[in-house]
């Protein structure tokens, strides 16, 4: 029985895209109108980069450039990290943590089919934790095996993911929550 949640089940299929020759003002307007924090930069149908609110803040606003004069291609993140819709959420989380990013374009057969954010993963993670907890309980009832504690995961107290976790009072928590619970 496979209990892993696939990226396909959590991703957003509506991906807002922009051409590399568009202006940063255009990108900011797309983000504001769609209440999102990034747009994928495409040439034709091929994703070539991503531009985020952070890119705009650091590369335009912070150095007092005019957004209507700066091209998206000049500030976008070009080394695009991607994931397949068939990959598991754990893999997406690990990529996000490793590269300190919050969004991953989802690519299938070379085509952009969605985007997944850390918020998408967090939204589905509580239900995934419950399924895993039930399975662990059922397996524990079947045989008395030592419980394996994962080194990294999602804190069941604060919801932070991709953190070092430890078992405290029957739940997995991050170091910060561990200190609070032990006080």
Image (cartoon, rainbow, N blue to C red):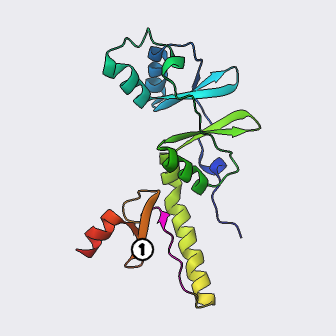
Q: Residue at x 45, y 32 (%)?
A: 37
x, y percent for residue 123: 49, 52
Nearest the eye: 126 or 147: 147
Where residue 99 appears, x then y in whole percent? 51, 44
The residue lying at 45 percent from left, 19 percent from top is 29
In the depicted structure, whether residue 94 falls above or below residue 79: below
Q: In the displayed structure, does residue 169 sit left or right of residue 76?
A: left
Q: Residue furthest left?
A: 183
- Vertical relation: 100 (above or below) 126: above
Q: Which residues are magenta?
A: 146-154
Quarter occupied by residue 40: top right
**Residue in the picture at 36% in, 60% down:** 158
Q: Main secondary structure of the magenta part?
A: loop
Tell which residue pokes out farthest to the top in this image: 69
Question: Are there few (<14), some (14-19), or many (20+) residues within 10 Å of tag 1?
Answer: few
Q: Which residue is mark 1?
A: 171
**x%, y% of residue 65?**
36, 13
Q: Residue furthest right?
A: 109
């Amino acid at each position: 029985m496979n209990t892993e949640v696939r990226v396909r089940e959590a991703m957003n299929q509506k991906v807002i895209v922009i051409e590399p020759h568009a202006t940063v003002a255009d990108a900011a307007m797309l983000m504001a109108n769609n209440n999102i924090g990034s747009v994928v930069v495409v040439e034709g149908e091929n994703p070539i980069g991503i531009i985020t609110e952070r890119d705009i803040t650091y590369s335009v606003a912070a150095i007092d450039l005019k957004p209507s004069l700066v091209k998206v291609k000049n500030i976008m993140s070009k080394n695009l990290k991607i994931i397949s819709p068939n990959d598991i959420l754990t893999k997406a989380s690990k990529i996000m943590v490793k590269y300190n990013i919050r969004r991953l374009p989802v690519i299938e057969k070379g085509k952009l089919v969605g985007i997944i954010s850390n918020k998408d993963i967090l939204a589905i993670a509580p239900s995934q934790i419950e399924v895993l907890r039930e399975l662990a309980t059922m397996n524990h009832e079947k045989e008395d095996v030592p419980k394996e504690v994962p080194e990294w995961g999602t804190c069941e107290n604060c919801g932070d993911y991709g953190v070092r976790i430890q078992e405290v009072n029957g739940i997995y928590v991050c170091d910060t929550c561990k200190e609070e619970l032990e006080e």
